[in-house]
Amino acid sequence: MWIRTASTDDLETISAMLTETWHDTYDHIYGREKVAELTKAWHSVPALKQRMNKPRTEFIVCDDGAEISGMAYVSQVDNETSMLHQLYVRPSTQGQGIGKKLLIEVEACFPDVRKIRLEVEEANDRAVRFYGENGFRQVGTTPDCGVKGSGIPAVIMEKVIW
């Protein structure tokens, strides 16, 4: 299994993986319909393709040659901070260290930044615990995770990386 830059050829697979992962994680919180609506807007191939073309970003996947089991998307916000927008691991491969591998790679993407920030849905206990176990600490909250007006409450976490 290796970490590599995502390509446009990966987008259908990534979209399907995100849809599967979001339903597994959030159906019990928001309901299947709301999760389907969000994944259609946020994880469609066109939405993912837009992210690939943004400057100062990295879009990476964990690939074992047969399956993409995880993905991450990070951007450099300013000279000292990067923002982890997405880090997801396919439900069937969670607990195998894939999230940790992706996180290590994301932390190295912008060598000049000194901290990495993220927003994580506060009801996603596994993710909050994962980030806490990997050196992140809560620095705030937001009523709108991901995009203004989302209505998804989130914890804002940061990690100093040097």
Image (cartoon, rainbow, N blue to C red):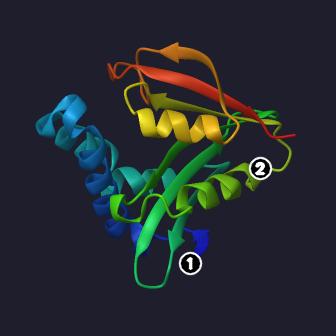
The type of residue carrying mark 2 is Phe
Task: Name the residue: 43% across, 71% down.
Answer: 68
| Residue bearing the label numbered 1 | 1
How far across and down, in percent of the image, does residue 33 sit? Answer: 12, 37
Q: Is residue 71 above or below residue 39?
A: below
| Residue bearing the label numbered 2 | 110
Q: CA distance from mark 2 to mark 1?
A: 23 Å
User: Which is nearer the eye, 150 or 116?
Assistant: 116
How far across and down, in percent of the image, does residue 4 sit? Answer: 60, 71
| Horizontal arrangement in the rendering, residue 139 relative to residue 44 (left or right) | right
Task: Name the residue: 14% across, 40% down.
Answer: 32
Answer few, some or many: residues within 10 Å of disc 1's Cα (few below 14, many 20 plus, some between 14 and 19): few
User: Which is nearer the eye, 154 or 51?
Assistant: 154
Q: Quadrant of the C terminus?
A: top right
Task: Name the residue: 35% across, 23% down.
Answer: 152
The answer to which quarter of the image holds residue 148 is: top left
Q: Is residue 141 visible?
A: yes
User: Which is nearer the eye, 127 or 55?
Assistant: 127
Q: Is residue 152 above or below residue 107?
A: above
| Horizontal arrangement in the rendering, residue 145 relative to residue 23 (left or right) | right
The answer to which quarter of the image holds residue 2 is: bottom right
Q: Quadrant of the N terminus?
A: bottom right
